[in-house]
Image (cartoon, rainbow, N blue to C red):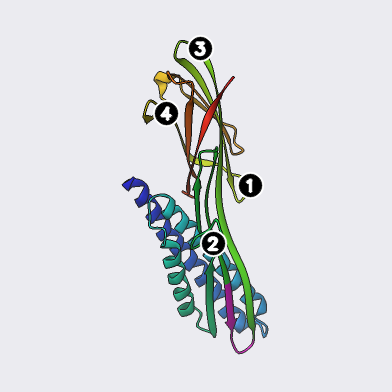
Amino acid sequence: MRQRRNSGQILLIAAFIMASLLVSAQIYIVDTGKITSESSSGALMDFILGLELGSRHVVVGSLANITNGGPTNVLAINLQRWSSVLSRQYFFGKNTLSYALRETSPYTSGIRIDWGTNGIGISSAYSNFTCELSDRETEVDRAYFENITTTVTVESHYLILSGDAKQVNVTVNLLNEDKPALANQIIIYFRRANSWQIPNADNNYEITDYGNGTYTASFIANIPSPTIEVSGRVIDQRQILVQANVTSAQI
């Protein structure tokens, strides 16, 4: 668990660096635009777009940190830091970034972690933003939101081979913002007695990546119980962790 937490923290630091670089680059564009053109509205819009992308990096990094064991209030802390950084970086006028974490159910302080037993797992972060930017020539008031959601669905069925031996098949589908996404890591578990176990080569474990967010796994295990519980633990390419459990259906 400690290794996963450190991974989330490293990603969060990287997100802040990337976000700051994006905004710094847009500040340079704004400055250059003021020298070469009387109108800087286009350059200011580029700055806003860079700010939005930077905000997205911070939200992604925060959610990755939380799902990998970080504190649940890290999103609020990081957005406060991000807002403070932006207010100091724009040197040509006034720049204020405000944010409001979603508090509507099922979100609390902008976070939704719902790793269910019905085959569906959701890790999500949601925040609204308002940017007010003005200088001697231009004024921009822009509202936007960032909704980062990683969803996994796990389906399973099994076939009785002989005695307690069963072949278990698992299908995993991964989505980022409701679009098919690739996994960085997938771990399948099955429950035997009171412990969760990971299938391996001794279980004839195989997993297939179809390259479109769909993965299938199969293994053989001696499980006395007619009820087989399966769990899929997935880390997406953004290092966001999501998990779902399901009861395998006999065929």
Q: Earlier in the sequence, mark 2 or mark 4?
A: 2
Marks 4 and 3 in Cβ contact (< 8 Å): no
Query: Mark 2 against mark 4, which lies toward the viewer?
Result: 4
Where is mark 4, residue-wise? Answer: 191
Q: Is residue 164 above or below residue 184?
A: above
Gap between marks 2 and 1 measured at Cα: 17 Å
Where is mark 3, residue-wise? Answer: 161
Where is mark 2, residue-wise? Answer: 56
Q: Could you say which is closer to the camera, residue 13 or residue 154?
A: 154
Where is mark 1, residue-wise? Answer: 179
Q: Earlier in the sequence, mark 2 or mark 1?
A: 2
Mark 2 surroundings within 10 Å by alpha-carbon count, few (fewer than 14), some (14 through 19), many (20 or more): some
Residue at the image point whose x is 45% and y is 10% from the top = 163
Gap between marks 1 and 3 measured at Cα: 37 Å
Q: Earlier in the sequence, mark 4 or mark 1?
A: 1
Kind of residue at badge 4: Arg
Placement of the C terminus among the 4 image quadrants: top right
Kind of residue at badge 2: Arg
Element type where label 4 sits in the image: strand
Q: Earlier in the sequence, mark 1 or mark 3?
A: 3
Gap between marks 4 and 1 measured at Cα: 30 Å
Placement of the N terminus among the 4 image quadrants: top left
> Magenta residues?
130-137
